[in-house]
Image: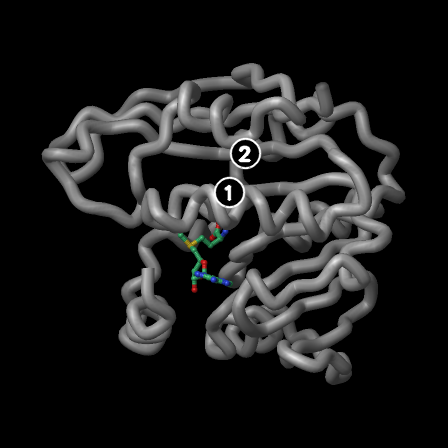
């Protein structure tokens, strides 16, 4: 997806993917990753998700990265947070009490930015990307993480011929292929619903270092 597409979505308020509440899969299953609450969590393509605050409340430090400056400004304003600017050669951003919010392209996040990261929370990040970018996303993630760390990944599956993305349809087989041989993939929970008249399954996966 081109950056312009996302900037337009944020500026025109077409952010239907944003959830007014904490993600229910996250609340129900995060503990099944077996993490220490001090673990630093990377939230790629974070938007202005409240899930970052929930993770922070648990004790995690959180690194979010998001293309849209508007998304991050909204996040700060909506939660009355005041950030201090971060220093980075390719990204702008803010530090706020246990949260590091980087603004810019995920592909500019560096290994040194993620040196402490011990887990990843991916809700609608992999599936925001078209097929041609997913392999690069997974490769970049691997390149910047200090080691293979546990992940929660939330994805959707539906008939891609019936609807265009994003969110794109990404099923278990593709996730297993993308993350092999580094991860074992298992399903935490699936929910079925209709989206724009199309049968959809949303699934939370646990990715465990193999
Ligand atoms: C489907 S939304 C999901 C947002 C968030 N994870 C959530 O659960 O609300 C995808 C987000 O990724 C951002 N994005 C898209 N491409 C990106 C990139 N290359 N680097 C950083 N953010 C990106 C978009 O601006 C958008 O906010």
The chosen color scheme is: one colour
Side (left or right) of 29 relative to 171: right
Badge 1 residue CB within 8 Å of ligand 1: yes
Q: Residue at horizontal 36%, vertical 32%?
A: 170
- Front-most of residues 206 and 14: 206
Quadrant, the N terminus:
bottom left
Badge 2 residue CB within 8 Å of ligand 1: no
Which numbered disc flags the more N-terminal residue, 1 or 2?
A: 1
The Cα–Cα distance between marks 1 and 2, rounded to whole angstroms, is 6 Å
Residue 90 higher or lower than 194, as above or below: below
Mark 2 — residue? Answer: 153
Question: How far across and how far down the image is residue 137, in percent?
Answer: 51, 49
Mark 1 — residue? Answer: 123
Q: Residue at horizontal 71%, vertical 76%?
A: 94
Question: How far across and how far down the image is residue 100, in percent?
Answer: 74, 66
User: Would you identify the image quadrant in which residue 18 lies?
Assistant: bottom left
Is the C-beta separation of discs 1 and 2 under 8 Å? yes
Q: Residue at horizontal 74%, vertical 39%?
A: 119
Residue 186 higher or lower than 205, as above or below: above
Label 2, residues with CA under 10 Å away: few <14, some 14-19, many ≥20? many
Quadrant, the C terminus:
top right
- Front-most of residues 104 and 143: 143
Q: Residue at horizontal 62%, vertical 42%?
A: 121
- Number of the label disc, if any, that sits on residue 27: none
- Total numbered labels: 2
User: Would you identify the image quadrant in which residue 159 lies?
Assistant: top left
Question: How far across and how far down the image is residue 180, in percent?
Answer: 57, 24
**Element marked by disc 1:** strand
């Amino acid at each position: 997806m081109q950056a312009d597409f996302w900037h337009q979505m944020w500026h025109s308020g077409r952010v239907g993917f944003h959830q007014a509440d904490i993600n229910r899969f996250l609340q129900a299953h995060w503990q099944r990753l077996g993490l220490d609450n001090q673990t630093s969590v990377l939230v790629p393509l974070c938007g202005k998700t409240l899930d970052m605050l929930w993770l922070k409340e648990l004790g995690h430090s959180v690194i979010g990265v998001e293309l849209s400056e508007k998304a991050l400004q909204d996040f700060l304003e909506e939660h009355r947070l005041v950030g201090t600017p971060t220093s980075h050669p390719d990204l702008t951003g803010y530090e706020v009490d246990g949260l590091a919010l980087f603004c810019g392209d995920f592909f500019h996040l560096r290994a040194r930015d993620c040196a402490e990261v011990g887990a990843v929370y991916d809700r609608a990040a992999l599936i925001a990307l078209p097929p041609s970018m997913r392999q690069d996303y997974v490769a970049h993630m691997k390149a910047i993480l200090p080691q293979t760390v546990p992940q929660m990944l939330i994805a959707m599956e539906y008939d891609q011929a019936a609807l265009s993305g994003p969110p794109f349809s990404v099923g278990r087989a593709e996730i297993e292929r993308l993350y092999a041989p580094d991860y074992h993939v298992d399903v935490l929970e699936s929910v079925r619903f209709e989206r724009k008249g199309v049968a959809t399954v949303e699934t939370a996966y646990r990715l465990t270092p193999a």
